Amino acid sequence: MAKSNDWGGPNRQWVIAEHPVTTLEARHFEYREAPVAEPGPGEVLLKTHLLNIAPVMRMYMMQGGAAGEAPLEIGEVIHGRGVAEVIASNHAGFAPGEFVQGQLGWQTWKVSRMTDAEKFRRLKPHGLPIHHALTVFGMTGFSAYCGFFGRGQPRPSDAVLVSGAAGGVGSLVVQMARLHGCAPLVGIAGGPEKCSLIEKLGCDVAIDYKADDVAAAIRESFPAGVDLYFDNVGGEILEAALGHLAPGARVVLCGSISEYQRQTPFGPRNYTNLRRANADMRGFFVYNHSAEFDAAEAAMAAWLTEGKLKAPVDVVSGFEAMPRALMDMFESTGGGKRIVQVVEGDIACY
Amino acid sequence: MAKSNDWGGPNRQWVIAEHPVTTLEARHFEYREAPVAEPGPGEVLLKTHLLNIAPVMRMYMMQGGAAGEAPLEIGEVIHGRGVAEVIASNHAGFAPGEFVQGQLGWQTWKVSRMTDAEKFRRLKPHGLPIHHALTVFGMTGFSAYCGFFGRGQPRPSDAVLVSGAAGGVGSLVVQMARLHGCAPLVGIAGGPEKCSLIEKLGCDVAIDYKADDVAAAIRESFPAGVDLYFDNVGGEILEAALGHLAPGARVVLCGSISEYQRQTPFGPRNYTNLRRANADMRGFFVYNHSAEFDAAEAAMAAWLTEGKLKAPVDVVSGFEAMPRALMDMFESTGGGKRIVQVVEGDIACY
């Protein structure tokens, strides 16, 4: 076995310096370097190629933890998923040269026993760029597919509203609703650039929450009410949607970015509207749907190969950019899935 | 055709004197007397025997109306359902001597065209007292049956929580959950008397929201979380239940008595808990389920006849007592279905 230094370290890491309470700031993060560890018996040495950036990461950083990940103590590596290459392996199930996605944390190297808790998943040979492992073939794609089809139970005749429509999950849901034939299909995003993006992806109407009266725009766009609302944001926009439901409507609660930076959570004051409409508000948490991931991946790989589905990415270059890449997410819901490219060079096919 | 006076009038009425904003008070009501009208062509003359009292009536009285009934102008007869006898009929579908339940309003006589809007329903000859038309065979019973079975989709293995458990709907849901085999079965009610009632009806545990820490009591009673929460109250108790859901839980939103007297509605701040549990919050409005009423009535009539279901009533005597009977509801969720007996004497079988 080679010595640590031979792997090309050091292991660059972002650890938590302070638990955020409201707005996420640079002082919450600290950069460190450590030697690359040797893989022991049953262990794998992973080299990070790509890291995911998602608003939920702020929740991971909160005092006491949240959103299904273990609480982070000060000085611990921040939680996050990414794509890595197996560099060395003492594990029967993984061979050097293979690519995996899973819980790497904000670091450039990881030694792992590949336990269930880390939720590693081998990249399948679709002949598609590896970054798709963090878009359609990652939790983003599975959230969109399993959330929309599994929890939303869309009928082709459904009038569909998507918030955070330019974001990683939202931009996929918009396209799936279009592929399913849903109309009208209306997206909510922040600013003209993102509104233009979601129109290109298939929205009949793009509502700009930074400029428009969202509730009025929803009423105008849905003469017979909203049949299916895919919610990535929560808060006041959820209220606006609850104010205009069609009979039998379904609201899929996938994300609530508007909540992540609030100190006092905001409950939708008009939730009783669900009663008159005999409507459902359905909670969705992607890891509860892992049995559906393979089917979702196969369906989305076919769409991607046929050019029917696009997975817009927003690639940020360099591991050093991680904190800024996350903090920026809260200025707006993002245009495409945000990814940090840790290993320089073209994102390879696999 | 006999003259108006021959019917035994006058028509005694309670009309709205002022729209309530917060607490319902005596000044919101005004008593009037009018002649009994003659039924015209196609019309029926109805004599009120029983009137229903339900917290939702305060909503009907609000400025602009609410809860599915037309807004009430000052001086109009307050909305309410009841049981009436057909005294005279120029309508091919109804004969004198028949009993009906439907939208009578707070008055002792009504002339009606028996339109769909009034939602009249003929009493079926079950050989049971007519007051059951306002319990199990009325909207109360249909709310319990269609809400619990239709929207709640209970499994016999479900751990069930019912709020407003001593009330009209709640007391029936408790018994249906017991008949279905659900355990643990826990009810929430106000005060020792009502808690004792719901234990007699089948609750394993009765939580007294006036004395107990509801959230702590829920945690203690449901080691594996709540599978099905039947919500009659909304507000803080809904939040307490949302704080302790089992995976795949269903929350049936049937009523929200805690909201009716609030000026600012209260949204459940922890609704995002639905996500982690992959849980549903399902709105329920009884009139959306009218196609299921006959089946519900048949099932409940069988249970009632076999002695498996009890429909506790809280009978208030005399039409003059209507306003007080309603105002008292807001002090607590009631022990059994509250009914005002307008025609004196025993409540007859039919």
Image (cartoon, coloured by chain):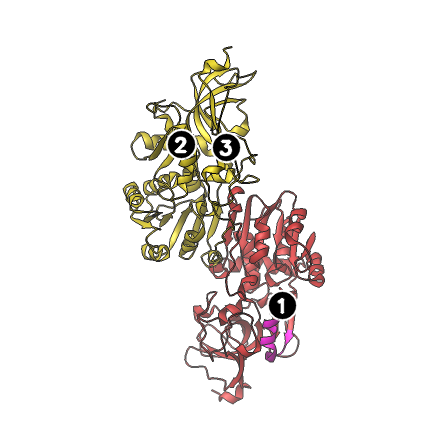
Chain colours: A yellow, B red
Q: Specify the amino acid type for callout 2.
A: Ala
Provide the secondary structure element on which disc 1 rests.
loop
Read off the residue under disc 2: A321
Tell me the distance, in whole angstroms, between the alpha carbons under discs 1 and 2: 59 Å
- Which residues, given as a range, are shown in magenta? B316-330
Q: Is residue B272 visible?
A: yes
Tag shown at residue A79: 3
Asked whether the residues under the numbered discs 3 and 2 touch, taking CB atoms below 8 Å apart as contact, a structural biologist would say no
Q: Are marks 3 and 2 on the same chain?
A: yes
State whether residue A97 is above or below residue B334: above
Provide the secondary structure element on which disc 3 rests.
loop
State whether residue B23 is above or below residue B4: above
Front-most of residues B12 and B116:
B12
Provide the secondary structure element on which disc 2 rests.
helix
Q: Position of residue B93 (x, y in %)?
A: 46, 72
Q: Specify the amino acid type for callout 3.
A: His
The verdict on residue B328 being magenta is yes
